[in-house]
Image: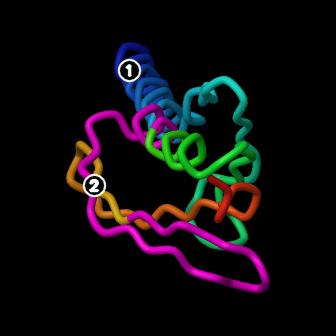
Amino acid sequence: MKRILLFLSLIGLLAASQAVQANAAPPNIQAPQGVTYAGGDGSGYAEAVIIQAPNEDAGVKAEYDWLAQRYPGYKRGQQSSIEHDGKMYDLLEITTAKGEKKAVYFDITSFYGKF
């Protein structure tokens, strides 16, 4: 009986450990020189990844750098620029390496229109 309880306890610990790993925070995203990231995970306007960059070239590159670090092996879909509540956003549709489709929002207000 003790062995069965021990076995069931071990299974429970293993399952809990896997659940924690599945919900682990994403790795720290490293910004290119002269760029900073803030905000959220990009899942909506309120959670947009805020990019501070000196110009559009640096800002757009920073978007793809962020995606490559957050979703290694992703495939790019459509991209669109949208004004929302007085700010500019890039919306990028991606497919993760696991086949999940996601929409990722970037607040590009700081560099939009700067060349």
Q: As rendered, which of 59 and 77 lies closer to the eye?
A: 59
45 up-or-down from 107: above or below: below
Q: Kindly report the distance in space between the C-alpha atoms of the residues bearing marks 1 and 2.
A: 54 Å
Determine whether the residue tagged by mark 2 lies in a helix, strand or loop.
strand
Foreground disc of the pair 1, 2: 2
Query: Within 10 Å of the Cα at label 2, are there few (<14), some (14-19), or many (20+) other Cα atoms?
Result: some
Quarter occupied by the N terminus: top left
What's the residue at 46%, 32% (across, down)? 69
Q: Which residues are magenta?
A: 65-92
> Where is mark 1, residue-wise?
1
Residue at the spot 43% in from the left edge and 67% down from the top edge: 103
Q: Position of residue 23 (x, y in %)?
A: 52, 41
User: Mark 2: which amino acid?
Assistant: Arg
Q: Which mark is residue 76?
A: 2
**SS at badge 1:** loop
Q: Mark 1 belongs to which amino acid?
A: Met
Foreground of the two, 90 or 97:
90
Give the vertical position of 8 relative to 58 (above or below): above
